[in-house]
Amino acid sequence: MAERTKVVEVVPYNPEWKIQFEQIKSMITGYIGDLILAVEHVGSTSVEGLSAKPIIDLDVVMDSYEVLPEIIERLEKAGFVHQGNLGIEGREAFKRTCEDGFMKYHLYVCPKDGKGYLEHIAFRDYLRANESAREDYEALKLNLAETYRYDIDNYCDNKTEFVKGILKMTIYRD
């Protein structure tokens, strides 16, 4: 099971997040770089200027599920536990079992054509390119973090409509 956030904390953007992402990416590619296509920084920490929960989200992109067994094997040898999809199709979650010196992060392995991966990229890129949407999302997140400080499920659930609205303007537009 994924580690549950006990307190919802949204903090101002920190340029260190980019540096941490690059360092984690380098570690991951050292383990499985020959099996994957890319490692993408997704989630709010990937959007410059956007307040976020201080947790790096990484989508490791694979060509197909054919390579997943070897990815699982190598990551397990490197100290990660495969957690399955945690209820989200097209995304395999991994949890670090030992301290590695990095800030908290979520590691997901996704197929290149997976819905979750494509949505992450579309949402991230839209926020990067649209200052007003970024500001609206930040205001929503700050408000929800205050309202649902000890309830991560409601915090996440109440962001859904905003996210769906962006996705309808990007990858799901008619």
Image (cartoon, helix red, strand yellow):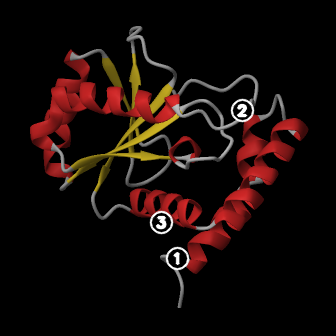
In the picture, the disc for residue 122 is: 3
Q: Position of residue 11 (x, y in %)?
A: 72, 32
Q: To which residue does mark 2 refer? A: 11
Q: Quadrant of residue 134?
A: bottom right
Residue beneath disc 1: 170
Label 2 to label 1: alpha-carbon separation:
27 Å
Mark 3 residue element = helix
User: Does residue 69 lie above or below 65 as drawn?
Assistant: above
Q: Taking 59 as reference, is 10 above or below it?
A: above
Q: Earlier in the sequence, mark 1 or mark 3?
A: 3
Q: Which amino acid does the dot numbered 2 rest on?
A: Val
Q: Which residue is outermost to the right?
A: 147
Q: Secondary structure at mark 2?
A: loop
- 147 left or right of 55 in image: right
User: Given contact means CB atoms under 8 Å apart, are the residues at marks 1 and 3 in contact?
Assistant: yes
C-alpha distance separating marks 1 and 3: 6 Å
Residue 94 found in image quarter: top left
Q: Residue, x 70% and y 36% (percent of image)?
A: 12
Mark 2 against mark 1, which lies toward the viewer? 2
The residue lying toward the viewer, choosing from 142 and 91, is 142
The image quadrant of residue 52 is: top right
The picture places residue 25, in percent across and down from the top left corner, at 30, 33
Going 59% across and 79% down the picture, which residue do you hit? 169
Q: Name which residue type carries label 1.
A: Thr
Instruction: Identify residue type, mark 3.
Output: Ala
* Residue under the point 51% across and 27% down: 1
